[in-house]
Amino acid sequence: MISLDQVLLLEEKVESAVAKIAQLNAENAALRSKCAELTNALSAKTEQFSSFQSDQSKIEEGILKALERLNTVENAVHAAAAKSAAAVNPSPVQEAPAPVAEPKPQQVIPEPSFENISNTSFDTATPVQESAPQQSSYTAPQQPVQDTITPQLDIF
């Protein structure tokens, strides 16, 4: 037969199992709650990510359109510059270089010497003869200077 000690031991083990089951049920509920929170956070982040992706593609499209417009404007400016350059220089025939004048020999003007000046006053000194003006040795450039300015578009 079953003794009272065996019944008390059985009752103690049943109570221990019930307490353990309650503890595991609470832990299970907490884990389910945490899982639900993480699932909601994941869906929110996924939605945010897809929103960022669509925004990114819209930004890229806008940048590409702006660059295309800038290329169009730049090409138009270059075409206008080419037209204006063609209007200024209608024929690409090169002109013969201008004849270069041979340099004339330079006159040497002696530097004044103070050794011949006496201690007389300047009122009685003899006038100094003026020499002919000195010729410049500058020669014109051989190639003509271009008068047109090519417009440039500075984007940045």
Image (tube, rainbow, N blue to C red):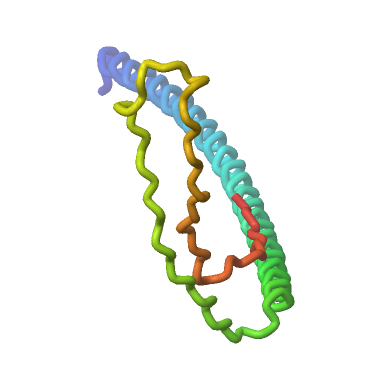
The location of residue 114, given as percent across then percent down, is: 33, 27
Classify residue 57 by image quadrant.
bottom right
Q: Is residue 37 left or right of residue 153?
A: left
**Which residue sits at x=72%, y=72%?**
84
Q: Nearer the viewer, residue 27 or 52?
A: 52
**Which residue sits at x=67%, y=61%?**
151
**Which residue sits at x=52%, y=78%?**
97
The location of residue 125, given as percent across then percent down, is: 46, 25
In the image, residue 68 sits, relative to residue 34, either above or below, namely below
Count of number-bearing discs:
0
Q: Is residue 10 left or right of residue 34?
A: left
The location of residue 119, given as percent across then percent down, is: 37, 16
Q: Quadrant of the N terminus?
A: top left
**Which residue sits at x=57%, y=42%?**
45
Q: Nearer the viewer, residue 110 or 12?
A: 110
The location of residue 18, given as percent across then percent down, is: 41, 23
Q: Is residue 137 left or right of residue 64?
A: left
Q: Nearer the viewer, residue 78 or 125?
A: 125
Q: Nearer the viewer, residue 48 or 154?
A: 154
In the image, residue 124 sits, relative to residue 94, either above or below, namely above
Classify residue 104 by image quadrant.
bottom left
In the image, residue 89 sits, relative to residue 122, either above or below, namely below
